[in-house]
Image (spheres, coloured by chain):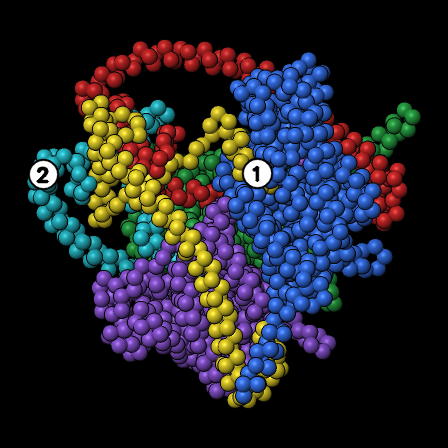
Chain colours: A purple, B cyan, C green, D red, E blue, F yellow
């Protein structure tokens, strides 16, 4: 009797999710779970972009608990049909997918990031950029990080899809990174969307630590002390024309950037119109919050042990910080050039804000500037390159998607 | 943990051909698994709970000592402050007379009384800052994580 | 002329939805519509869980109006392909489904209940449970109602899927009942998801009537008079660790419970983190409200006359109240045992709160306790078993889903 | 109700080959069905409306009698209450002097006046209770239906 | 070197979206973009129904930017399988669709309009209609615009689907127009859903300009001067029975109207019940706002140059205004009849409010009435026909969908 | 604009077989396209910005002149108004004494001070009108666009 009971208990233990840790490679899940705890800690205690890192890290936990079956990376392989058509088998996902598979469809169908951009557009003030359109150039320069990292990733022997996905981290823009990587990466790649998102959000949280040393190294004390005057006020009509203009120009030039830029600008137009308050507010609050939850937890779910615990992960970590650093440097260097060309009217510190990471990067510019001249308010001047960086990253994303056809 | 044990049941129960023993097994296995699961939680939560209880008690003792000290100090300072604010009349400053608060509360009460309900001040929240000179930055704050 | 007009009118009348009442079995629709009115009355006038019973009863009305074709129960039959693959034909539903078919996909894809659990997690305070973890045992005991009802349903000759679906009513947890029954039941069963949901919510509303007699019968006056002291305060860190711990333990032990428990705990972590207020609030308000509407009206739509007007319905009604009663009794009995073991420190009345039905069951404990000692505040002590009951039901749901493979 | 009548039309209209008669039929059938439907609603709503109107009128009469009585009583009591509150100065209680309300309203008006708009007190709502000692229960209240 | 650079630049220019303007028919896109600017201007500066016209016009812009590929009209052709089954290939849309294709599924699956009706129901007060049920007749008469326009469109040689879609514009109800036209129209028709929506919302915005001359022309000064007394108060129970009654009657008579009327009435019941405030508020705010954005931008996206720049567009414009005018006239004429029958107790001006366009049409009645007797408050009396018009249009929509099977 | 130039790259990069030159091209093409795109935006925004700047400056000059005039007028009127309101005591009207505002603010400050934070009045909003006699119309207003 006791014998039988004990054997049943033994059977039970053998079949549990716990047993999943002891199968081949099962220890990797434990490591991943510990990493998810680390990110939860960083999000909660250290304030690392908690709105996304917390859902991402919880998704990471759920996906690495053996047997929970809430996400299946094997469902997200591209099937090849005939000569050159490849597709995801959504029918199969509807039949057999877990909760996080179903919700992940919104990422793979490229819906969530543009809708988050809609919300961001509805809460962004492009006034500083309109007042000083030259900021666009700084927003362009800071995308240098993306393309030089592409080169670096290629040198490290990664596939084109991987190169593009890692490079976009340098755009310092979460939804854009997810948009590009979810389009490029499939189950057969050595990295996943979650890896890219984790790196992007982590480095965005680390902007105040990564950027200042680079900024100080590349500028002279004199340059950092340049005081910039007040920006001209921008009329409502200018603010109304801006989103329409940007949509037309960018969508015509880089059609692949149209969904991101188009939604960003539509959100902004809804806000600036002043007659669509009720929908602009929903776009920037409830709609964005709902999608943030779905996006975070499902993107986190893609970080299965198999995907993360590879050499590629280390490459992502290293290339990611390089991408951020080069982006910062490019922005600063163009800032220096503009300083020279304007005979010292532009403080090069606002250049680093071009990486996006709104509004953290602009605040870093402000803070480093104040170290020299405490009364110098660079923030508004840095907001120009900062929001230009968002547009710039979206444009760079379009270029990457055009080049790296999957 | 319950997988193997229930697989035999499962194969029988999926069809309609299950015996009385099968059903008894469902009840016993089911209750056991639920109890094992929640007993595990009792253990884990108790363990870390005990650890924290101790830690909290230390912290609390310390805090209370600090509070007592602070209170004593405050009580000494209050009368002086009160006198001052009464002389200068109501001004916008931290040490404002509590009577003013009473006036406000009274007024609110007067209005509410008409509904026949007696309200109590539950909380006073600081208003959320809106559009200060550097408004865009504050606004953009919301966009941080994206 | 008049002849032709009259014949046209006659033709019209013959073809109308009204005519649908006179075809074979059409009278059942009338009965169903009257039942939907009854539930509307209970929801509005008697306050029976109106947030869900009102949408459910409206869905019931819509689905039983002949010809409205907003829901088609025949679309939700499992198709068998090859040897053992069976699936719902979602393609067909997209092509030919009505509004409520499309929205019902969220139930059948098992999305709505976990998302409602996300919202519940974001509004639940697990403090009382953490302060007194032994409450978990009471939450476990009260699940006895589920398993004994399984036995009862089997004795009445129902299929395994039906047994599991009826049993889960004893969990006194709406979304859990819908989650389990929508997974187990298909068109070929004699009961539907809506029947289960109706019974679950009705009995939850009746908790203040069903429980007290059982509570009084099983306890002595002395036991009911036990005064319980204040609970210790729980630190923020403990509240942060709790959801993570529960997720890991439960998902490893009963993987099928992972979606419900995982989402419940993710919602709780978002809330307790204190850094994700904006998404935690959306999860518990707008997101939950939207899903509540969709869930209610579509679950109501599954109560077609064919499904409800059977002998099985009577069985559901009877077994449901038995399930609730046994659950209550089991909780009380374990409460009595704990009372003995703690030498009278535990008031057994808090045991009945273990059935979940948050927070109604806890209030019933409080009320019955106050009948003896008016100054006795059992509410917080009963909240422990109460929220433990939610976790317990989700675990029991996982066990049922594992056992009763469809 | 409209099904058979329109089916013949339907079969013809689906293609492009419909005649003038078909179209005339659409207009006539369409308007007829809309009118029949809404006339039915008129009838039903009128019938139950009449029933309720009678019931309401009785209720109303009763209520008004009660109100009048209450008002008379209130008017007698009010002066006493006012005098009392004036003597004791503003305190937090139901019978607070209406002048205090005036002060508050005046202050708000003073601020708003700068926007060039004259506000009116539209309503005073009781604040929603938040986290009282038994907060968890209140909070959990929202979870009831799930 | 310079040669090569210049040739690259030339290549780039040739391949850009700009080049798309110079291909065959590309100039039409430019015209369409200019039209979208016009509608943006009307929405923002002139306040033309901005909540929908602004998203619609932005969708119009996005869809006509060559290369952006956010919407593909060619995906929305009905496929024919076997003898008489035809369907949209949703699998293909999921695989290859752009953002706006995916979101447009909500229109084509007939989800968005009923959900918007849910929100409208939750904010509508049917009190004035219950107090004076004869208003229903005015709401019926004003649908005359729909059916006479059907006749007009047929005379102009349009297909049955086109006739129905154009006719429904006369219902002066946006979601109803979109519901009907998205069901009837496919890629093979010469007009699109967007065309219908643009016309409907534009004319709704123009109600204060279109209606008054017709109202004055058809009424005498004496009729316009009729003062109407106060409406009787309506009890809560009457308001509760109303939505249920209307659902039952309409769904039985015109089953095709059930989704619209059912959702409208469910929203109203949620509101009037007083016990479902939290979901009633979400239905009328966040849910409706989210769907408004999706509905607007995707419906706008259907206005591809190919669809709009046809002779049919001109027909839509002309027939649309005729539909509105006839609807107004029919309402007024029945108003006159009711005036005679009640011996001058009914002011015929409230008849024009029967076209719906809530609450603009009711305000127009009020305003035209006040021109004669400044103290005459017709608004509440006009609200009856106004909300009856919403029900009437939904009924007419059901009739059209029954008649014009696609 | 970038399509043809990148198509050659694309065909090579899709596989794993890309050379160093390909990668260099990606970097150069990529940065060029981004810069060309944003430079175009600089141009367009600058052009229309200049136009508006001029227009705004004219408007602003006009506005400021008006403001100055208004201010002068206001300053003359203010003392009188203040005196009047002091004499008559606090009443509900536009010209209410600013001291009352100070009292309110002070009271709020007194309460908030307990949290150790010094609040500032950021804005006073007019309350949204709710359910006036013609409430249904106001409510229905929200339904306008549908
Ligand atoms: Na960027
Ligand atoms: Na339970
Ligand atoms: Na209408």
Q: Residue at x 10, y 41 (%)?
A: B81
Is B2 above or below relative to E377? below
The chain ID associated with circle 1 is F
| Mark 2 element type | helix
Query: Does residue D91 appear in the picture of this structure?
Result: no
Q: Residues within 10 Å of mark 1 (few under 14, many from 20)?
A: many
Residue C36 lies left or right of residue E252; in this view the side is: left
Query: Does residue A48 appear in the picture of this structure?
Result: yes
Q: Nearer the viewer, residue A124 or E368?
A: E368
Tell how many labels. 2
Is A113 above or below relative to C135? below
Residue A94 lies left or right of residue A337; in this view the side is: right
Nearest to the eye among marks 1 and 2: give it: 1
Is C400 above or below relative to F69? below
- Pointer 1: what residue? F144
Q: Residue at x 64, y 16 (%)?
A: E222
Is A303 above or below relative to C292? below
Q: CA distance from mark 1 to mark 2?
A: 57 Å
Q: Residues within 10 Å of mark 2 (few under 14, many from 20)?
A: some
**Residue B84 marker:** 2
| Mark 1 element type | loop
Q: Nearer the viewer, residue E217 or C400?
A: E217
């Amino acid at each position: 009797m006791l014998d039988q009971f004990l054997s049943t208990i033994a059977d039970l233990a053998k079949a549990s999710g716990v047993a999943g840790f002891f199968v081949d490679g099962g220890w990797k899940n434990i490591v991943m779970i510990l990493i998810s705890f680390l990110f939860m800690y960083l999000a909660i205690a250290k304030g690392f972009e908690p709105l996304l890192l917390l859902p991402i890290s919880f998704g990471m936990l759920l996906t690495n608990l053996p047997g929970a079956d809430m996400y299946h990376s094997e469902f997200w392989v591209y099937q090849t049909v005939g000569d050159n058509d490849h597709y995801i088998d959504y029918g199969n996902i509807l039949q057999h997918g877990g909760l996080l598979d179903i919700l992940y469809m919104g990422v793979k169908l490229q819906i969530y990031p543009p809708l988050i951009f809609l919300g961001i557009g509805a809460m962004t003030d492009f006034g500083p950029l309109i007042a000083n359109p030259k900021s666009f150039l700084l927003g362009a320069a800071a995308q240098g990080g993306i393309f030089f990292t592409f080169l670096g990733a290629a040198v490290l022997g990664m596939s084109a899809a991987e190169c593009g996905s890692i490079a976009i981290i340098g755009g310092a823009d979460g939804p854009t990174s997810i948009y590009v990587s979810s389009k490029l990466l499939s189950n057969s790649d050595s990295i996943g969307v979650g890896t890219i998102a984790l790196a992007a959000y982590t480095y965005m949280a680390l902007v105040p630590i990564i950027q200042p040393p680079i900024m100080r190294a590349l500028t002279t004390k004199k340059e950092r002390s340049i005081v910039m005057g007040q920006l001209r006020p921008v009329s409502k009509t200018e603010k109304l024309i801006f989103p329409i203009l940007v949509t037309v120009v960018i969508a015509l030039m880089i059609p692949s950037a149209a969904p991101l830029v188009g939604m960003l600008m539509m959100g902004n137009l809804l806000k600036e119109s002043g007659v669509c308050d009720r929908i602009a507010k929903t776009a920037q609050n409830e709609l964005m919050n709902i999608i943030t939850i779905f996006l975070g937890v499902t993107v986190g779910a893609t970080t299965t042990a198999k995907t993360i615990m590879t050499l590629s992960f280390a490459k992502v970590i290293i290339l990611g910080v390089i991408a951020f650093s080069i982006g910062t440097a490019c922005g600063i260097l163009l800032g220096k050039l503009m300083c020279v060309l304007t005979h010292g009217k532009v403080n090069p510190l606002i250049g680093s804000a071009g990486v996006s990471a709104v509004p953290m990067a602009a605040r870093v510019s402000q803070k480093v500037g104040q170290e020299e001249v405490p009364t110098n308010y660079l923030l508004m001047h840095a907001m120009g390159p900062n929001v230009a960086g968002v547009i710039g990253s979206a444009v760079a994303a379009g270029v990457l998607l055009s080049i790296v056809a999957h | 943990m319950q997988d193997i044990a229930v697989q035999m049941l499962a194969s029988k129960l999926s069809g309609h051909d299950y015996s009385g023993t099968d059903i008894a097994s469902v009840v016993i296995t089911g209750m056991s698994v639920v109890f094992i699961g929640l007993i595990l939680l009792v253990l884990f939560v108790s363990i870390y709970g005990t650890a924290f209880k101790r830690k909290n008690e230390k912290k609390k003792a310390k805090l209370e000592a600090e509070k007592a000290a602070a209170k004593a100090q405050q009580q000494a300072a209050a009368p002086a402050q009160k006198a001052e604010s009464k002389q200068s009349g109501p001004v916008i400053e931290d040490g404002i007379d509590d009577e003013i608060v009473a006036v406000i509360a009274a007024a609110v009460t007067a209005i509410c009384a008409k509904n026949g309900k007696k309200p109590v001040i539950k909380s006073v929240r600081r208003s959320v800052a809106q559009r200060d000179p550097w408004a865009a930055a504050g606004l953009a704050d919301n966009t941080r994580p994206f």
